[in-house]
Structures are given as structure tokens and as C-alpha cells.
Amino acid sequence: MKIGYDAKRLFLNNTGLGNYSRWLVKNVAQNYPGNEYFLYTPKAKANNRLSFLNNYSNIKTVTPKSKLFTSWWRSKGVVNDLLRDGINIYHGLSHELPAGIKQSGIKTVVTVHDLIFIRLPDSFGWINRRIYTAKVNYACKIADKIIAISQKTKDDLVELLNVDAGKIEVIYQGIDPIFNSLQSAAQKEAVIAKYNLPEKFLLSVGTIETRKNLLLIAKALTHIDNTPLVVIGRPTKYLNEVKQFLTDRKLTGRVIFLHDVTFNELTAFYQLASIFIYPSRYEGFGLPVLEAISSGTPVIAATGSCLEEAGGPDSLYVDPDDENDLAQKINRIFADENLRQTMIAGGKQHAARFENIKLTAQLTQLYNNI
């Protein structure tokens, strides 16, 4: 079988949609080598996370012949290349499918990660909301099958866009195996020394934007002991709001902001942290939560979207506006070692549901069924 992918995000995005694309392509190529996989991208930009492509002879990268009108090529012109290459199934990895593909006879799958642009419209500009909505509506209408990366995303598709539930299959995203590997003492010590980390700290990972709700953790710091907070993520203007609060409350010395942590170092941070906190108001799945429980770190996440799916029954959850409850749960974990160990063991058990080989088997079965 020849399977084509919209691989723009795989090459050009370092987080989120890029991680999903790289995870999926790597795992299908590794576990199902009998197929051929074609990556269609307007630009094959170098990325240090793409070294795995050299390991698989069954992966081929395809770019447009001309560097002009690459957006048109991705949204429509690519169909001619799919026909030329004899593609059996084309998978849009991030909400989109090209115009005209229905008429080509090529079977199609589209992955929808979330409908945040509808749930939290203030987080997006008016024009972007219109574009995203139109693209998702079109893709869901013409796709033979839709993959939702969580049950919450499937529910949103049905509720907000009236998509036929029978057309949607929930297939979760897995994580890089690095998060299941225990870091050596030397590896941890190197990270501690490089970043001058305290012995005990809370951890937050993710883009520092309004939706991720870092301010809730900052507010909770006023109700707990002097445990510091380490924040890893790309900054946005929202960081200024958080820093202003920390300044006003004389908390600046308790928060360490890191914006250039490498992917390989991240697993050491998870394993060194006392508690991982993810109070995001809305997510499609919440991969950092899965990374944390796989690393053996107790997790506190927010209610309201899909984070209970990622964190499982042994993680703790709080209302994204309740700083007091967050502080109480932090203090509770610190005070109760039995609870802490139960959370760690339960998290590991829940994480086993997301083994890559299981998820890849689900995905390949979906391909075979269409």
C-alpha cells in the first residue's frame, strides 16, 4: 500500500502538530515496513528531529517542482502528484485535505486535534477562526475517515460541527520512547548543573500563552511553602502578565523560566520534578501530561477538556480558576508519601495504554478498513 501524508508540520513545526506528525510517520514506517510512505511538504526544512527518516528506505519526501505558489500546491496542486505516485490513501495530519482529492478517487483520512478556535475564540483572530473552521468543515465532509486524538475532540466534532460520530475514530497519540527511559544519575546531574536546578521543584511545560494558564500556578505559590517552580516553554506576550504578578507578590525569586531546553534534556526535568502541573484551560489531548506520568512524576492537571484522558484516574485535577484547590493538592502530595507513590504507580499503569505499537496497530487497521 502507498500512503501519502501532508507533511508540512512534520518538517516545519517543532512542537504540537509537528511532534504528532513525526511520531506517526516514524511508527508506521518502523512497525509496518511493507508499505511505502510519501511525505508531501512545500519545503523540506532541516530539523534535528528528523534524523530517523534516514533509517527507513520505505519513506520518500516529495516537494513541489517550483518554489512559487507552494501554498496552492499544498491545498490543491498536490493531488496531481498523488495520482502520479499511485497513492492509495492520503492522510491529512493536521485538520486539512486538499481540494479536488475526493474526485481523484484516492481514499482519505484526516486527523483533527482540537476545536480550540471554536471553544476559545478569543485566542484567535477573526480571520484565522474563519479559515480554520472552513478547512476543518471541508476536510470532515470529504474524508473517508476522521481520526480524533481524544474522546473530547470527537465529542466536540459532533457537538460543534455536526459531524457523523460513526465517521470518527479515536486514536490517541503516543510519546517518544525517551520518556519511558530512566535517566542515569550522570544525565540528571548534568541537567542540574547546567540549569542550576534546586533539589525540589514544581514543573510546568508548554508554550507560555493565556490558554495554558500559568498564572494559576503563580497564584497557588502564595498558598504553599517556598518550593520553587520551573517553567519550560516558548514565551508570548502572556509572559509579561505572569511576571508582573510575580513582581507584585514578591515571588520572582521562586520561578525559573527556561526557553531553550533541548528535547533530550526534557525527560530529565520530568524525572527530577516533584510534581508536574498542567492547568491548561483547553487541550486536544495534553501530551505533556502523558510524558510526565510516563516519567514517573505525579501530575495535577485542569478539568474542562481532555486532560483526564491523558492523566488517568490516579492523577489529580483542579478547576482552572481555583488557585486554592491547586495549592491544597500540591501540599497534599508533599505531605502524603503513600499518595505520591500511588500516583506514580497508577500513572505508569495508565501510560501503558498508550504504547506506540498498540496505537500504530489501530491506525494501520483503519487504513486497511477503508
Image (cartoon, grey):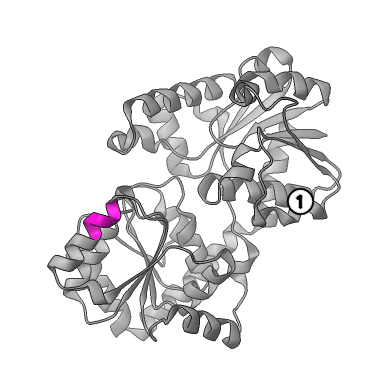
Circle 1 Cα neighbour tier, 10 Å, few/some/many (<14 / 14–19 / ≥20): some
Across and down, in percent, residue 11 comes to 64, 44
Across and down, in percent, residue 299 comes to 40, 68
In the image, residue 208 above or below residue 138: below
Across and down, in percent, residue 310 comes to 47, 56
Residue at the image position 56 percent from the left and 46 percent from the top: 13
Q: Nearer the viewer, residue 256 or 86?
A: 256
In the image, residue 148 above or below residue 274: above
Check disc 1 and report its element: helix, strand or loop.
Answer: helix
Residue at the image position 55 percent from the left and 83 percent from the top: 190
Quadrant where the N terminus lies? top right
Q: Which residue matches tag 1? A: 53
Magenta-drawn segment:
238-242
Residue 222, by quadrant, is: bottom left
In the picture as drawn, the residue positioned furthest to the top comes out as 103
In the image, residue 304 above or below residue 279: above
Across and down, in percent, residue 82 comes to 76, 24
Residue at the image position 28 percent from the left and 84 percent from the top: 335
Name the residue type under label 1. Answer: Leu
Residue 10, by quadrant, is: top right
Q: Nearer the viewer, residue 287 or 54?
A: 54
Residue 87 lies in the magenta stretch: no
In the image, residue 357 above or below residue 269: above
Secondary structure mainly formed by the magenta segment: helix
- Numbered marks: total: 1
